[in-house]
């Protein structure tokens, strides 16, 4: 996978090796709850914890099928542990989840990897409200439940798109970070911002696998350059932040020669060549669809590359802003944003009240939600083109 995303070595190998004894000792004596543990990042985090033999690892996710695959994958590679390893196919915003939190011996660490991560989720006001529920409201609720159980540490994943956000997904995570600051007064928290996770579920690169399996053309933008981490690196980053991060720390990958921007179209070319096919660039979607059988039969794969014009695409990716305080010396390949507990309590309460008001209506529109986000993030530079990836092949 590293070669496909244009790299030759793992990002955090040195950091993990340097801290391995500490990480393993902490995991071995601790009880973990991983929320959203059947997603791509959640599975990677669960694996990182499991292989260090925790006292307990409980995984929660609404995807029953992905949860089955997580267990099969762990059993087929890592095997078994003496600790208590269990999975629960429940929603973290549900009554059942609250009952789980109140049962048993409790947890030392709660890691929340549950998120709606796609920019396309803002295309309609109803999916957008679900994004707010998952990324903000459920996070607040699970933090409060963790606090009641005297959890040692709460970790919640953020995104690079929370730094100077231009889309509603990134803005929702920025607002979530504001709530984290408030809760940090009574519950130790940490988080991480990181780039695209290569071949994660639902991502464009994951779509390459789907298109190849179904013998369909591959399409990708040829003008969008992004940073990528592997699933294992995403798990390592989350584990390091949750176990080693101080209260209010935000971990992120340092921009070194090992982490460079790469184009989706370049990954598509390397991907197909690794599978023994030569990409054949078509001039339109119609040509790519129409010539699929012919081209694939002669070991060529139809591709359609295009200039991006979809809503919420940042011109460049960044992990922090000029206003944030950084610690770049603690780890060789990880940077840390150091935060003071600065927040506007009245504004946070107002946000919750406005969301409740909007949701109490028979229906709602995107402009009123966007106006709310603009109030919370005055410099929110929302990029709206009216086009989303659902309009692409």
Image (spheres, rainbow, N blue to C red):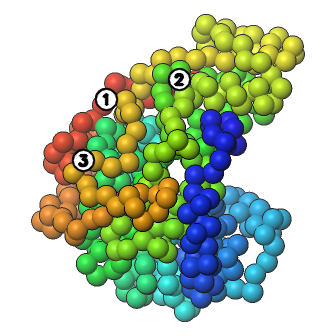
In the picture, measured across the screen, residue 280 lies left or right of residue 17, that is right
- Kindly identify which residue carries mark 2: 221
The foreground one among 202 and 151 is: 151
Q: Residues within 10 Å of mark 2 (few under 14, many from 20)?
A: some
In screen coordinates, is 123 left or right of 26?
Answer: left
Which residue is at the front of the view, 297 or 336? 336
Q: Residues within 10 Å of mark 1 (few under 14, many from 20)?
A: some
The CA span between labels 2 and 1 is 18 Å
Q: Measuring from the top left, give residue 150's x and y in whole percent.
A: 40, 88
Q: Going from the N terminus, do you reach mark 3 or mark 1 first?
A: 3
Judged left or right of residue 259, residue 28 is right
Crowding at label 3, few (<14), some or many (≥20) Cα neighbours within 10 Å? few
Kindly identify the residue that appears in the image at 47 percent across and 52 percent down: 253
Tell which tag, 2 or 3, sits nearer the viewer: 3
Residue at x-position 56% and y-position 82%? 26
In this view, 256 is above or below 336: above
Which residue is denoted by mark 1 in the rendering? 384
Q: Which residue is mark 3?
A: 322
| Labels 3, 1: front one | 3
* Image quarter of residue 125: top left
Residue 6 shows in this picture: yes
Q: CB of mark 2 within 8 Å of CB of mark 1?
A: no
Q: Residue at x 18, y 66 (%)?
A: 342
Image quarter (top left, top right, bottom left or bottom right) of the C terminus: top right
Q: Is there CB contact under 8 Å for labels 2 and 3? A: no
* Distance between the alpha carbons at the discs numbered 3 and 1: 25 Å
Secondary structure of the residue carrying tag 3 is loop
């Amino acid at each position: 996978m590293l070669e496909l995303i244009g790299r030759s070595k793992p990002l955090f190998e040195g950091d993990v090796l340097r801290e391995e004894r500490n990480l393993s000792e902490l995991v071995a004596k601790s009880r973990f709850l991983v929320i959203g543990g059947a997603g791509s990042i959640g599975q990677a985090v669960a694996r990182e914890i499991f292989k260090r033999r925790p006292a307990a690892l409980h995984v929660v996710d609404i995807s029953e099928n992905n949860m089955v695959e997580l267990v099969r994958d762990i059993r087929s590679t890592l095997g078994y542990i003496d600790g208590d390893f269990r999975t629960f196919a429940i929603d973290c915003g549900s009554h059942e989840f609250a009952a789980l939190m109140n049962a048993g011996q409790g947890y030392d660490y709660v890691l929340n990897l549950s998120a709606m991560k796609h920019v396309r989720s803002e295309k309609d006001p109803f999916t957008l409200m679900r994004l707010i529920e998952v990324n903000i409201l459920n996070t607040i609720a699970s933090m409060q439940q963790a606090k009641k159980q005297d959890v040692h540490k709460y970790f919640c994943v953020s995104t690079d798109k929370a730094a100077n956000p231009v889309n509603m997904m990134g803005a929702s995570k920025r607002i979530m970070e504001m709530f984290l600051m408030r809760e940090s007064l009574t519950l130790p928290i940490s988080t991480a911002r990181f780039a695209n996770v290569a071949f994660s579920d639902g991502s464009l690169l994951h779509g390459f696998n789907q298109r190849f399996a179904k013998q369909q053309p591959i399409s990708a933008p040829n003008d969008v350059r992004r940073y990528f981490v592997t699933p294992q690196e995403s798990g390592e980053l989350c584990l390091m932040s949750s176990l080693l991060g101080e209260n209010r720390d935000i971990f992120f990958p340092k921009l070194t020669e090992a982490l460079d921007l790469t184009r989706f179209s370049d990954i598509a070319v390397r991907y197909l060549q690794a599978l023994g096919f030569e990409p054949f660039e078509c001039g339109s979607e119609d040509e790519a669809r129409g010539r699929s059988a012919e081209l694939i039969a002669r070991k060529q794969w139809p591709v359609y590359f295009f200039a991006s014009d979809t809503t919420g695409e940042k011109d460049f990716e960044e992990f922090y802003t000029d206003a944030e305080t950084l610690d770049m010396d603690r780890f060789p390949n990880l940077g840390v944003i150091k935060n003071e507990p600065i927040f506007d309590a009245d504004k946070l309460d107002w946000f919750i009240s406005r969301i409740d008001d909007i949701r109490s209506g028979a229906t709602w529109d995107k402009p009123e939600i966007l106006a709310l986000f603009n109030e919370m993030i005055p410099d929110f530079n929302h990029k709206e083109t009216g086009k989303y990836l659902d309009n692409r092949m």
